[in-house]
Amino acid sequence: MSDPHSENETDLRHHVTNKVVYFTIFILLMGLTALTTGIAFVNLGIFNTPVALGIAVCKASLVILYFMHVRWSPRLTWVVILTAFSFLGVMFVMTFADYLSRGWAWPATGPWVQ
Amino acid sequence: MSEVELHGEHQHPHLQHHFEDLGQQHVTVTLGMWAFLATEILFFGGFFFAYTLYRHAYPEAWTIGAHHNNITLGTINTAVLICSSLTMAMGVYFSQLGRRKPLVNSILATIFLGLVFVIIKGVEYAEHVREGFFPGVLFTYSGPEARHVELFMVFYFGMTALHALHMLVGFGILTWLVIRAQQGWYSAEYYGPVEVVGLYWHFVDIVWIFLFPLLYLINRHG
């Protein structure tokens, strides 16, 4: 062993994502963009928005996993990302629990009270 | 004790003294960028939350506002930004192979596509202002739900402008990257800055991936 540190070096620095992977992800992203625009003109009832957001989540996941190399990143990176999205979830769930329940227990006014 | 004794004879010129080796340095800068992006997710998240709340309160106004937006330009811009993400990813790829010329070209292509996006966005903005959809004194739309449509446009301009601001910051960093790359700073051993700028650029792309359906694609089948 000429370099005593080589064992400590993580694989991340040496992982070169294949060009074919990048172009495949690119084509998928373009396809999903065409799909989301096209499907917006089809009446899916209450499902139009969930489908549009579902496609957006798929596109974002492809970008994060492949373009941003998270698929090959250390677990600590995964923890940071999942923590961020968890707190985003907390903000949405807790705040909506407040707004959407206004007027349930006692009379209230405002645009959120049905 | 000299630097050579601390790090061995083959210390890389871009290895900062507080890191064990280039691998540890690379993992650290990448994680640092992700920590920043985590704050960005929550920063934009606040806007996305408020958008959702008011969309829930005024669904008809959101439909009217989204129908006013130019879906063709929106779709083209989404495609342009995805192309720029590909060129950025290819920039990281070429830097990993230590190929200077293709790296520089990839970043230049990324800047070019980003500029195309911002110019198209500007054309859309001009259209909104001309049609009286800019919130405030310039807002002249007086059809149904006018006050709430104005609120939608506040979200539209706020969110797209915050996104565009991130792109302008991106142009600055990418330009710095082009200069450094031309000077031959990056190699298969050391390409952390290219990777980190790439993470930032892809994040900006992801924000748009969500903005596009939320601002352009509401009840289009109606």
Image (spheres, coloured by chain):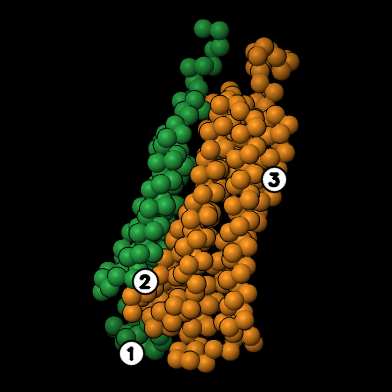
Q: Chain of mark 1?
A: A
On residue B175, the disc is 3
Q: Which of the chains is green?
A: A
- Secondary structure state at the residue bearing disc 3: helix
User: What residue is shown at x 65% (from left), y 54% (from top)?
Assistant: B169
User: What residue is shown at x 62% (from left), y 67% (from top)?
Assistant: B122
User: What residue is shown at x 43% (from left), y 68% (from top)?
Assistant: B214
Q: Is residue B208 left or right of residue A46?
A: right
Q: Quadrant of the N terminus of chain B?
A: top right
User: What residue is shown at x 38% (from left), y 48% (from top)?
Assistant: A28
Q: Are marks 3 and 2 on the same chain?
A: no
Instruction: Name the image quarter holding residue B121.
Output: bottom right
- Secondary structure state at the residue bearing disc 2: helix
On residue A96, the disc is 2
Q: Colour of chain B?
A: orange
Labels in figure, total: 3
Give the labeled residue for mark 1: A107
- Secondary structure state at the residue bearing disc 1: loop
Q: Residue flagged by tag 1: what amino acid is it?
A: Pro
3D distance between C-alphas at marks 3 and 2: 42 Å
Q: Are marks 1 and 2 on the same chain?
A: yes
Residue B61 in sight from this viewpoint: yes
